[in-house]
Image (cartoon, rainbow, N blue to C red):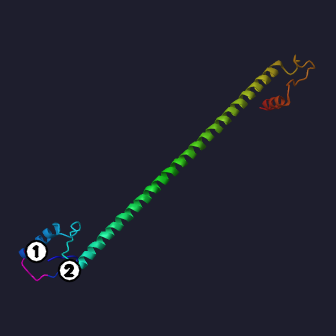
Amino acid sequence: MRNLGRRVILPRRSASVLVAAWEAESRAALQEEPGGDTRAGIGYEGDPEQRGQSQRLRELEHRTRSLLRQRQEALHQLHVLLQKEKVDALQQLHEALEQEHEQRQQREQLCMEKTAALGALKEQLMQMESKGPGRVDQADPQGKEDSLPSKPLKRVAHRSRAL
């Protein structure tokens, strides 16, 4: 007596008879039968309907495995694509940071040059002021009060005096 997904109605029997029947059926399901499918515990004894169901089950398992392999391959390809995009994004970020660093260094260098030039102008201005406004500068024999050589120096000197 086999139960292949069908409901089997047994007459009321004692528990020992039911246990014996269950054990016999379990043993038979575990043993390999010629032409049977022991993986799923399905054995058929020449019944075409059972053979058809077993064949459909194997086909379904095969399609399921094939679909899972396809999905796994697609996920692998997506993973590879995401890794490439991640590497590209990190490389672009690295290049942008390098460019920003170079620009910052250029700005700092320019600022240092401006500071040095301003310091030199202030020093020159201090030297000129230390000579006094009434004194005649040796470089300026006409006795002009403003003896700075160029207009930018004159502007810096004027701004420095205002401070």
The answer to whether residue 13 is magenta is: yes
Between the C-alphas of marks 2 and 1, the distance is 15 Å
Magenta region: which residues?
A: 10-15
Residue at screen point 10% across, 74% down: 21
Residue 5 location, quadrant: bottom left
Q: Which dot marks residue 100?
A: none
Depth check: give the residue in front, 64 or 78. Answer: 64
Q: Which dot marks residue 21?
A: 1
Residue at screen point 49% across, 53% down: 82
The kind of residue on which mark 2 rests is Arg
If the image is split into quadrants, where does the C terminus sit? top right
The answer to whether residue 86 is magenta is: no
Depth check: give the residue in front, 27 or 62. Answer: 62
As drawn, 27 above or below 111? below
Spot occupied by residue 120 in the image (x, y as percentages of width and height) = 75, 25
Indicate left or right for 17 with 68 as reference. Answer: left
Q: Which residue, given by chain and number where applicable, does mark 2 sit on?
A: 7
Spot occupied by residue 134 in the image (x, y as percentages of width and height) = 88, 20
Spot occupied by residue 86 in the image (x, y as percentages of width and height) = 51, 50
If the image is split into quadrants, where does the N terminus sit? bottom left
Indicate left or right for 133 with 116 as reference. Answer: right
Depth check: give the residue in front, 15 or 23. Answer: 23
Residue at screen point 42% across, 58% down: 73
